[in-house]
């Protein structure tokens, strides 16, 4: 069936009103005072026949620059990655896309197992011991990690690297304001966290230090060096990480992280114009009972058969509000399922190969741009994103690229005036050599 919406007929409306015991719409809303009701006609278009409406909506949709028609080098937290075909097939099954919270395990084994597998694979990728069933997105996960750290250490100051995604920083600060937590930014140097500045800012009042790996500029932070500075003051070390990068990089858990969070969007979740996506949250075993959201555990039934249940739910829905870890009362089960299916389809070697291709193709793009006279802003190692410094406003360059069928990189000047005319370019495994070479040519032309 092409159309998933069927309009309500006058007969349908009449039957519904009769069922609830009223005779008209006016009677249905009789309890609402007349003075607060909307008077007149809504300023919306008149109804059209279905065929005309579908045509108009398609014309509106076609105004969007989509990734099927354009080659994208835009990343900055949302990436154009390969999605195994099986992902859409599995998540389109009605028992998954209509499910909410699997409170009744006897009828929810499929979803519970999928979430359990998601948790397991996140633990394997991050090098951590426990992961929850997912969260709203990576930014929410990072903010929750900061608040967990404050609760665990009973301290009210958080240090966050300036190289963390600006939107994630904003979410952390929003959470912190409600909890009366002080958030201090640690400056960066050459695209990574300034370790000397971090040492100066560290003291016994710091609950946690938050960094991103790879960071917002695509650079690889020196986690081991940061970990030593953080733990010397008995603070908690929180790392926000792109899970795909962990197919090639050393997992944060192996480098001393207490909490690892991030967004599972690179695995089987479309860009979707910015969301919805799926956050993940992984910790060491000692923090298991402080994890926000819910955890699915494996057990056996009375016949000894393998089964799955919700085991821990440190949420205000289930325990006293003053004891709750978080107010988040939901998760992204469907998107977590998509990520699980994608990771399963790719396998360990597939994830490693995919991560390696991101590294190789991004470095090829960087080398070609350098050879064509484009200045690279930072010198350190990076994953699949890097920053270039151009001679013209990024908005102007991106307009030129768009006219050539290319979605350009992120304009860093939008969030940091010091990075005016700096562009963050993302190169994923989907970009071909021809597409990269075209970008290099057009970027060079547009920069002159």
Image (spheres, rainbow, N blue to C red):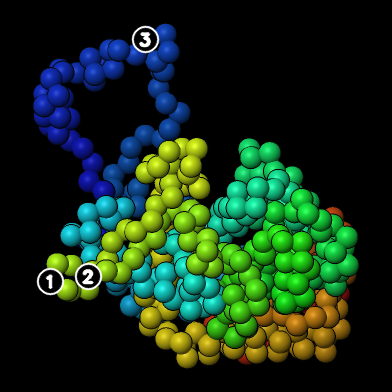
Asked if labels 1 and 2 touch by Cβ distance under 8 angstroms, the answer is yes
Q: Mark 1 points at which residue?
A: 303
Is 289 displayed left or right of 414 in the figure? left
Is 407 displayed left or right of 85 in the figure? right
Q: Measure how far apart labels 1 and 3 are at the Cα level.
A: 60 Å
Q: Name the residue under label 3.
A: 33
Kindly identify the residue that appears in the image at 76 percent across and 61 percent down.
233
Kindly identify the residue that appears in the image at 47 percent across and 44 percent down.
324
Q: Can residue 441 be seen in this view?
A: no
Kindly identify the residue that appears in the image at 30 percent across and 69 percent down.
298
In the rendered image, the vertical position of residue 308 relative to residue 312, given as above or below: below
What element does badge 2 sit on? Answer: strand
Is 11 displayed left or right of 287 in the figure? left
Neighbours of disc 3 within 10 Å: few (<14), some (14-19), many (20+): few
In the rendered image, the vertical position of residue 30 relative to residue 422, given as above or below: above
In the rendered image, the vertical position of residue 253 relative to residue 272, given as above or below: below
Q: Where is residue 415 in the image (x, y as percent from the top left)?
A: 76, 55
């Amino acid at each position: 069936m092409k159309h998933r919406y069927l309009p309500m007929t006058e007969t349908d409306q009449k039957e519904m009103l009769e069922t609830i015991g009223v005779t008209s719409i006016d009677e249905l809303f009789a309890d609402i005072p007349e003075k607060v009701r909307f008077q007149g006609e809504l300023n919306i278009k008149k109804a059209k026949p279905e065929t005309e409406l579908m045509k108009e909506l398609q014309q509106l949709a076609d105004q969007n620059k989509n990734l099927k028609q354009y080659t994208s080098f835009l990343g900055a937290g949302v990436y154009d990655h390969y999605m195994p075909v099986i992902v859409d097939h599995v998540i389109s099954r009605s028992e998954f896309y209509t499910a909410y919270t699997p409170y009744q395990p006897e009828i929810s084994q499929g979803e519970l197992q999928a979430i359990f597998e998601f948790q397991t694979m996140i633990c394997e990728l991050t090098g951590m011991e426990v992961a929850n069933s997912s969260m709203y997105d990576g930014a929410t996960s990072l903010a929750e990690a900061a608040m967990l750290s404050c609760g665990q250490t009973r301290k009210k100051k958080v240090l966050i690297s300036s190289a963390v995604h600006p939107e994630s920083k904003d979410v952390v600060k929003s959470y912190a304001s409600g909890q009366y937590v002080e958030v201090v930014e640690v400056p960066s140097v050459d695209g990574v966290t300034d370790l000397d500045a971090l040492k100066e800012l560290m003291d016994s009042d710091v609950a946690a230090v938050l960094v991103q790996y790879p960071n917002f500029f695509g650079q690889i932070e020196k986690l081991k060096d940061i970990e030593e500075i953080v733990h010397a003051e008995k603070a908690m070390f929180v790392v926000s990480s792109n899970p795909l990068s962990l197919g090639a990089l050393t997992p944060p858990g192996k480098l001393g992280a207490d909490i690892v969070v991030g967004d599972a969007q690179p695995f089987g979740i479309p860009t979707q114009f910015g969301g919805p996506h799926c956050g993940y949250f992984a910790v060491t075993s000692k923090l298991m009972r402080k994890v926000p959201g819910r955890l699915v555990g494996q057990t056996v039934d009375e016949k000894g058969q393998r089964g799955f249940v919700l085991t821990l739910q440190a949420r205000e829905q289930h325990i006293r509000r003053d004891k709750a870890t978080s107010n988040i009362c939901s998760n992204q089960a469907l998107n977590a399922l998509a990520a699980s299916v994608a990771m399963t389809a790719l396998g360990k070697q597939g994830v490693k190969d995919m991560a390696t291709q991101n590294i190789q193709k991004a470095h090829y793009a960087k080398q070609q741009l350098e050879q064509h006279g484009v200045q690279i802003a930072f010198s350190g190692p990076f994953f699949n994103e890097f920053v270039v410094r151009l001679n013209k406003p990024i908005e102007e360059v991106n307009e030129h690229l768009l006219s050539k069928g290319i979605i350009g990189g992120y304009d860093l000047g939008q969030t940091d005036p010091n990075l005016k005319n700096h562009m963050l370019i993302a190169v994923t495994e989907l970009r071909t050599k021809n597409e990269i070479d075209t970008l290099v040519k057009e970027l060079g032309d547009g920069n002159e």
